[in-house]
Amino acid sequence: MVYVVKVDQDTCNGDGACADNCPNQVFDMVNGKSQPTRADDCVGCMTCVSVCPTGAVTVTEL
Ligand code: SF4
C-alpha cells in the first residue's frame, strides 16, 4: 500500500501531536508546522489523523 500524507499548513497549529505519535517518524516540525517529510514510510495506521486536534492531517491510499 502507498499512502499520501498531507498536512494543511493553514490548519496545523504546530502542537506536534502527529510527529509525537507517528510510529514511523513520518513528520518533521518545520518553522512551527508539521511536514510529512518521510511520507514514504507511512503504513496507514491513521494515528496522526486521530490525534490531530485541528483535522489538519489527511492520509489517503494511493
Ligand atoms: S498514518 Fe500512521 S504511519 Fe502514516 S503518517 Fe499517520 S501516524 Fe504515521
Image (cartoon, rainbow, N blue to C red):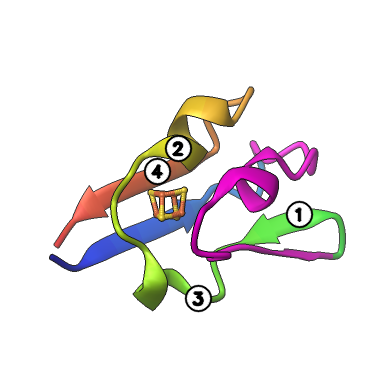
Question: Residues at badges 1 and 3 in contact (C-beta under 8 Å)?
Answer: no
Question: Residues at badges 1 and 2 in contact (C-beta under 8 Å)?
Answer: no
The three-letter code of the residue at mark 4 reads Thr
The three-letter code of the residue at mark 2 reads Thr
Around disc 1, counting alpha carbons within 10 Å, would you say few (fewer than 14), some (14 to 19), or many (20 or more)?
Answer: some
First along the sequence among labels 1 and 3: 1
SS of the residue under disc 4: strand
Q: In which quarter of the image is the C terminus?
A: bottom left
Q: Left of 41 or right of it: where is 16?
A: right
What predominant SS class does the magenta segment belong to?
loop
Which residue is most to the top? Answer: 53
- Compute the Cα span from label 3 to label 4: 14 Å
Which residue is most to the front? Answer: 23
User: Residue sitting at 55 percent across and 37 percent down?
Assistant: 56
SS of the residue under disc 2: helix
Camera-side mark, 3 or 4: 3
User: Residue sitting at 36 percent across and 76 percent down?
Assistant: 40
In the drawing, what numbered circle is on residue 47?
2
Callout 2: CB less than 8 Å from ligand 1: yes
First along the sequence among labels 3 and 4: 3
Residue that mark 3 sits on: 38
Residue that mark 1 sits on: 33
SS of the residue under disc 3: loop
- Compute the Cα span from label 1 to label 4: 15 Å
User: Residue sitting at 61 percent across and 25 percent down?
Assistant: 54
- Compute the Cα span from label 3 to label 2: 15 Å
